[in-house]
Image: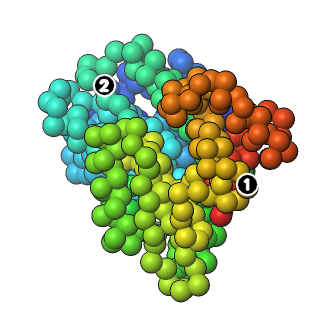
Amino acid sequence: MRKRETRDIVLVVDDSPETLRLLTEALEDAGMTVLVAREGEHALSIVEKVLPDVILMDALMPGTDGFETCRRLKQNKALIHVPVLFMTGLSDTEHIIEGLEAGGVDYVTKPIVPGELLARIRVHLANARIAHSARTALDAFGRFLLATSRTGSVLWCTPQAAKLLGDAFRDFDTEDYVLPHAAQVWLQQCVVAAAAQPASTPASIGLKTDKASVKLQLIYIAQIGADEYLLRLIEGEIGDDQTLLKRKLAVTEREAEVLLWIARGKSNRDIAEILDLSPRTVNKHLEQIYAKLGVENRASAAALAVRTIGIR
């Protein structure tokens, strides 16, 4: 599949010649390359040959409508990060929701205002590239992470997570792997709980694997997309992070507690308030932590704590 070289590629899917003419002219004037599809099936055929950077999708078209086309496009792993903006003359909430649930990131109402549309495209392109770069960085730094849909279908995973899953499940395939039923139910519960209490502690669940010798745990991290949920994979039995830091790094209970909050990005003042300590006492604990870990500053201590929690 060919990727863009210099110009951003926009795929416009619309059955209206007038709309196609307007958008093609505006997008090309903005320095973008425009691909045109008159209906959903044609769009699906185009993306097999060329990977667009952004897709503009008419909501209502003859044959396969925009919602169904978007759902089918998002089944393609290569298109997960590509933003889809719906174009519609409808302002009913139900249609807006349907577009977002199908995998769209935004919508614009007809008649299209080119300037507004271009501004939205640039914002979503920038966001998509940041997200894609973050995934690449996660791959490079060896984190055991994966993202799934709400129903448990794996959208992507880092190479390290894929290796663990491949070791645990005989028929594992990143293209069509779906979490076991118990994990699907757990994920649904996590999503609901996170919506009600965003600051709640991430939940975890054990995965029943095909090999008795391999034990895996999943930790829910956060929702990172319209239907994309980030999970952390851990090998072995999961324990409380604080207990793990105490055991692995040979620190006291209180030092492990302080170290955990450092790893979570809290300042000394925040930690003092959370643990009901004086800032001076927190500083004393930090001095002991640095000495025991053989590090010189809080950044190094935090990095060591995160690495200890993340790799088991």
| 12 lies above or below 292 | above
Q: State the image quarter where residue 215 is shown.
A: bottom right
The amino acid type found where label 2 is placed reads Val
For disc 1, the marked residue is 249
Q: Return the residue nearer the eye: 52 or 192.
A: 192
Quadrant housing the C terminus = bottom right
Residue pictured at 30% horizontal, 47% vertical: 193
Q: Position of residue 255 (x, y in %)?
A: 66, 44
Bin the neighbour count of mark 1 within 10 Å (Cα to Cα): few under 14, some 14-19, many 20 and up. some
Q: Does residue 9 appear in this view?
A: no
CA gap, disc 2 and disc 1: 53 Å
Residue tagged 2: 108
Residue 296 visible: yes
Q: Which amino acid, by three-letter code, is at mark 1?
A: Leu
145 on left or right of 220 = right
From the viewer's perspective, is residue 42 above or below residue 126? below
Q: Identify the element where label 2 is drawn.
A: strand
